[in-house]
């Protein structure tokens, strides 16, 4: 079975789109970064390395320092799928990030986005 194209796409290609999406709605790059840090355990330095090295999505998530244990609290629809029901772990992680970015763009409070 052919793997989805997103797996081999550099994270650096999509990252600016996340920022662009939220900035249109009055949110910030810092908030996008906070979501990424919360979800994956990356920090400012390690995220910049990922961007500089054009790390693909599969590697980005495989090498994530510490996926947040509260990811199971992320629920809802994204791209026509319920994120909690996606069986492919990597696709689920990608959709978790998409879902959190969507929530940010829709104006949800950071405390709720980060499941606090």
Image (tube, grey):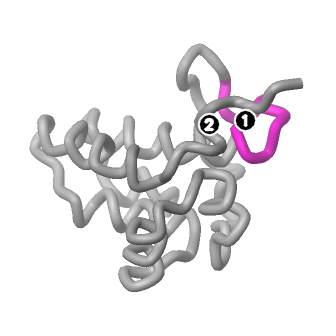
- Disc 1, SS: helix
Q: Is residue 76 above or below residue 95?
A: above
Chain-order first, disc 2 or disc 1: 2
Residue under circle 1? 84
Real-space CA distance between mark 2 and mark 1, rounded to the nearest whole angstrom: 6 Å
- Residue found at the very far right of the displayed protein: 1
Picture residue at 79% right of the left edge, 45% below the top: 89
Q: Position of residue 17 (x, y in %)?
A: 30, 41
Residue under circle 2? 75
Picture residue at 62% right of the left edge, 36% below the top: 75
Q: Quadrant of residue 70?
A: bottom right
Count of numbered circles on the image: 2
Q: Quadrant of residue 74?
A: top right
State the residue in front, 96 or 59. Answer: 59
Left or right: 26 as drawn, with respect to 30: left
Task: Report the magenta stretch's main SS.
Answer: helix
Q: Position of residue 49 (x, y in %)?
A: 44, 77
- Disc 2, SS: loop
Q: Is residue 92 above or below residue 64?
A: above
- Estimate how packed mark 1 is, as few (under 14), some (14 to 19) or many (20 or more) residues with alpha carbons within 10 Å: some
Left or right: 96 as drawn, with respect to 83: left
State the residue in front, 16 or 38. Answer: 16
- Estimate how packed mark 2 is, as few (under 14), some (14 to 19) or many (20 or more) residues with alpha carbons within 10 Å: some
Does the stretch in magenta take in 73?
A: no
- Residue found at the very far front of the displayed protein: 53
Picture residue at 28% right of the left edge, 49% below the top: 16
Left or right: 93 as drawn, with respect to 46: right
The segment highlighted magenta reads 82-91
Say the numbered circle drawn on residue 62: none
Disc 2 vs disc 1: Cβ atoms closer than 8 Å?
Answer: yes
Q: Quadrant of the N terminus?
A: top right
Picture residue at 45% right of the left edge, 45% below the top: 100
């Amino acid at each position: 079975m052919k793997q989805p194209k997103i797996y081999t796409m550099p994270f650096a290609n999509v990252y600016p789109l996340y920022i662009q999406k939220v900035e249109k709605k009055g949110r910030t790059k810092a908030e996008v970064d906070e979501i990424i840090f919360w979800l994956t355990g990356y920090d400012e330095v390690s995220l910049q390395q990922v961007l500089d090295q054009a790390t693909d999505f599969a590697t980005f998530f495989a090498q994530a320092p510490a996926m947040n244990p509260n990811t199971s609290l992320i629920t809802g629809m994204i791209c026509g799928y319920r994120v909690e029901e996606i069986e492919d772990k990597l696709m689920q992680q990608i959709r978790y990030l998409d879902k959190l970015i969507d929530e940010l763009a829709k104006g949800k409070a950071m405390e709720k986005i980060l499941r606090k």
